[in-house]
Image: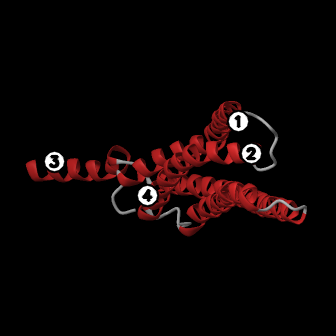
Amino acid sequence: MELDEFKKNWGAARREGPEQGGPTREAVARIIERNTSSLGELREKSAFWNRIGGWNAALLVLLTVGYLGWQYHRGLAGAALAAKIPLVAVLVGFALFSGWTYRRQEEIFSQNTDASSREALRRTLAAFKHYYRFTNAVFLVISPVAFYAVFEVPGIGLSFSASSLAAVALTGFSFLLRYGYYRAVFFRRIRAMEANLSDLEDTPGF
C-alpha cells in the first residue's frame, strides 16, 4: 500500500510540476514571440534614426566645411581663420560621432536576433545599457562645445558668456528631449524584455 501511494503521489507531482516550477512550454513560446516582436520594433526604429542621423551628420559636415571654405575664399586668413579651425573640427567630430551612435544602436538590435536564446537576449540588453550610458556621457561633454561652436563659427557676435550660457541651455534641452524619447519608445520595451529574460532564466531546458 505504501508503494502504491508513493507511485500515485509521484505521478501527481510530475503532472503538476511544469505549472508550479515555472512557465509552461506554451508560456515560454509566448515570451519568445513577445521578445521577437519587441526586437523587431526596436530594430525598425533604430534603422529609421540611422538613416536620419546619417543624412544630418553628412549635412552638418558639408555645411561646416563649406562655410569655412567660403570664408577663406572671401579673404579670411591668418589668425582669424586659425581661430575657427578648432571649432570647425569640433562640429565635424560631433557630426561623425552622432552618425556613429545611430549606426551602433541599429547594430545592437540586429546582431543578436535569436529571441529564443537567453544569452543572445542578455547580450542585447547589456549592450544597449552600455551604449545608452556611454553616449549620454559623451554628449554631455561635447554638446556644449558643439553648440558654442555653432554660435562662434559664423561670428554671430555674442559675448563669450552669452554663447556659453546658450550652449549649456541647448545641451540641457536636447538631453531632456533625448531622455523623453527613449523613455517613451525604448525603455518600456527594454523593461518588458528584462522581465521576459528573468522568466526564461527561471525555466530549465530553454
Tell me whether circle 1 and circle 4 mark residues in contact (CB < 8 Å).
no
Number of numbered discs visible in the structure rendering: 4
Give the residue at mark 4.
122
Cα separation, mark 1 vs mark 3, equals 84 Å
Label 3 Cα neighbours within 10 Å, binned few <14 / some 14-19 / many ≥20: few
Between residue 180 and residue 193, name the one nearer to us.
180
Cα separation, mark 4 vs mark 2, equals 45 Å
Residue 126 x %, y %: 45, 55
| Apparent side of residue 42 relative to residue 124 in the rendered image (left or right) | right
Viewer-side label of 2, 3: 2
Viewer-side label of 1, 4: 1
Label at residue 163: 1
Tell me whether circle 1 and circle 2 mark residues in contact (CB < 8 Å).
yes
Viewer-side label of 3, 4: 4
Give the residue at mark 2.
152
Give the residue at mark 3.
5
Residue plotted at (63% across, 38% down): 175
Q: Can residue 51 be seen? A: yes
